[in-house]
Amino acid sequence: MEIKPETLQWKDAYKLMVGSILPRPIAFVSSQDENGDDNLAPFSFFTAISADPMMVCFSPMRRGTDGAKKDTLKNIEATKEFVINIVGEDIVQQMNDCATEFTPDIDEFAASGLSKEKSAAVKPPRVKESKVHLECVLDRVVDYGDHAGAGSLVIGKVVHVHVHDELYGNGRIDTEKLNPVGRMAGATYTLPMANTFELQRK
């Protein structure tokens, strides 16, 4: 089958992408508005960019109902700071609870039962129950439209990293102990460590 993207409705294009680009890591992003109110939301369009400087990015799509910016994006544009909390199996339910479209006055930490922990270099708190935190300052935002189905690329420079001591040794993270969750299509998630294999690069 051959498909021209311009012939698809945005919801169909979205289904095509999330059904083929997988598993996707989850950026559980904590941010703060100009009044100091906290926000916490997951995004599965997330990856690393470079190691030196340490750069990461994630993409919040516009709200499907009205094309409005999500609170996370508005907060980051206003304050230039955020934290990416890595999602392990032990907090996957709370992460899913935070995917709800709450109104800006609702604190997702409180709604999900997750704990706040003070960050070292930025104002937004990190998720205490997460085992890896990437504290970031905003490098830039690249917008791709302002309508439902459009999105933005948020690029951040990592300025501080927290890793639970039990995970870190010899400069490496023990992935089995981290037990990260990946997003599939629809309501399906995966634990990548359940079926891993090795290939040596030539």
Image (spheres, rainbow, N blue to C red):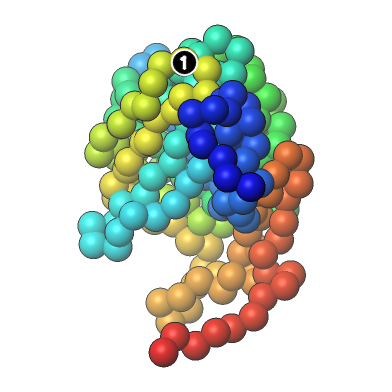
Nearer-the-camera pick, 152 or 120: 152
Residue receiving disc 1: 147
**Helix, strand, or loop for circle 1?**
loop
Tag 1: Cα neighbours inside 10 Å, few (<14), some, or many (≥20)?
some
Nearer-the-camera pick, 80 or 155: 155
Left or right position of 201 against 10: left
Mark yes or no: residue 68 visible.
yes
Residue 9: x percent and y percent?
Answer: 59, 24
Place residue 14 in its image quadrant. Answer: top right
Mark yes or no: residue 108 visible.
no
Nearer-the-camera pick, 57 or 129: 57
Place residue 180 in its image quadrant. Answer: bottom right
Residue 95: x percent and y percent?
Answer: 66, 39
Q: Quadrant of the C terminus?
A: bottom left
Residue 192: x percent and y percent?
Answer: 67, 64
Identify which residue is drawn at 38% across, 45% down: 57
